[in-house]
Image (spheres, helix red, strand yellow):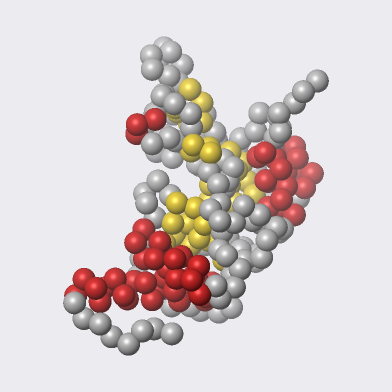
């Protein structure tokens, strides 16, 4: 009998094997016809007004890296997948403009392994790095997602764009780092330094003032 690949289970096992804690999230389902004749996407939690469809914690299970527990949690029809910062990885929410420019600078300079990242519906970026070695000064607008703060992980599905509410939901994926979490990550210091440089250059451009480049 043919069975489709359970890509969410494969991803959950890969994250857990790499020491990144995982947890199930509710998923996206079509609204019953009695509630919505158009069959729009809603959260499987059952709340038609859910403010985080398919992206919030499901059930009472906790964060885990136990492979047996993971295998039991993501069955043939699996829930979405959440991961969180920890000893293996830190996640950062980075502004749209300075994030894009910082990643461009990173690509040009290649100071180390490429950071796994994805674009959020808000236009901001979610970037994965090694945890910082100590206290670190954050560039303007950058937020560290502390351990326990859930991150919707690829290949989970999230709501489509406005123009596609009746179409397929969107499968998330890591950009330029499809091998994550098996591949190495750059240091937080390397990535955030370039995001900070991009933000400084943006401010200088807007103000018409040019100072010495940050190194």
Image: 48 above or below 119: above
The residue at the point 73 percent across, 47 percent down is 13
Name the residue nearer the viewer: 215 or 6.
Answer: 215
Quadrant of the image for the N terminus? top right
Name the residue nearer the viewer: 148 or 31.
Answer: 31
Q: Residue furthest bottom?
A: 212
The residue at the point 32 percent across, 87 percent down is 212
Residue 121 is left or right of residue 132, and the answer is left
On the image, the x and y values in percent for residue 107 come to: 50, 67
On the image, the x and y values in percent for residue 25 come to: 57, 40
Q: Residue furthest top?
A: 34
Name the residue nearer the viewer: 24 or 208.
Answer: 208
The residue at the point 68 percent across, 52 percent down is 15
On the image, the x and y values in percent for residue 10 come to: 71, 43
On the image, the x and y values in percent for residue 131 come to: 59, 70
Say if residue 155 shows up in the picture. Answer: yes
Count of numbered labels shown in the rendering: 0
Residue 113 is left or right of residue 168, and the answer is right
Q: Quadrant of residue 110?
A: bottom right
The residue at the point 64 percent across, 49 percent down is 22
Quadrant of the image for the C terminus? bottom left
Q: Residue furthest front?
A: 108
Q: Quadrant of residue 134?
A: bottom right
Q: Residue furthest left?
A: 208
Say if residue 142 shows up in the picture. Answer: no
Image: 145 above or below 215: above
């Amino acid at each position: 009998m043919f069975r489709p690949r359970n890509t969410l289970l494969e991803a959950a096992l890969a994250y857990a094997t790499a020491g990144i804690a995982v947890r199930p999230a509710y998923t996206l389902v079509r609204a019953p016809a009695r509630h919505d004749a158009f069959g729009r996407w809603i959260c499987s939690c059952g709340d038609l007004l859910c403010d985080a469809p398919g992206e919030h914690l499901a059930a009472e299970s906790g964060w885990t890296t136990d492979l047996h527990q993971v295998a039991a949690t993501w069955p043939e029809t699996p829930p979405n997948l959440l991961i969180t910062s920890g000893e293996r990885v830190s996640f950062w929410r980075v502004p749209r403009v300075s994030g894009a420019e910082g990643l461009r600078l990173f690509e040009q300079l290649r100071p180390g392994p490429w950071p796994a990242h994805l674009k959020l519906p808000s236009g901001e970026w979610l970037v994965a790095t090694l945890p910082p070695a100590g206290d670190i000064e954050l560039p303007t607008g950058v937020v560290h997602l502390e351990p326990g703060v859930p991150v919707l992980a690829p290949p989970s599905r999230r709501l489509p764009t406005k123009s596609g509410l009746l179409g397929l939901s969107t499968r998330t994926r890591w950009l330029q780092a499809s091998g994550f979490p098996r591949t190495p990550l750059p240091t937080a210091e390397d990535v955030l330094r370039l995001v900070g440089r991009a933000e400084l250059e943006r401010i200088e451009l807007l103000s018409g003032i040019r100072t010495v480049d940050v190194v």
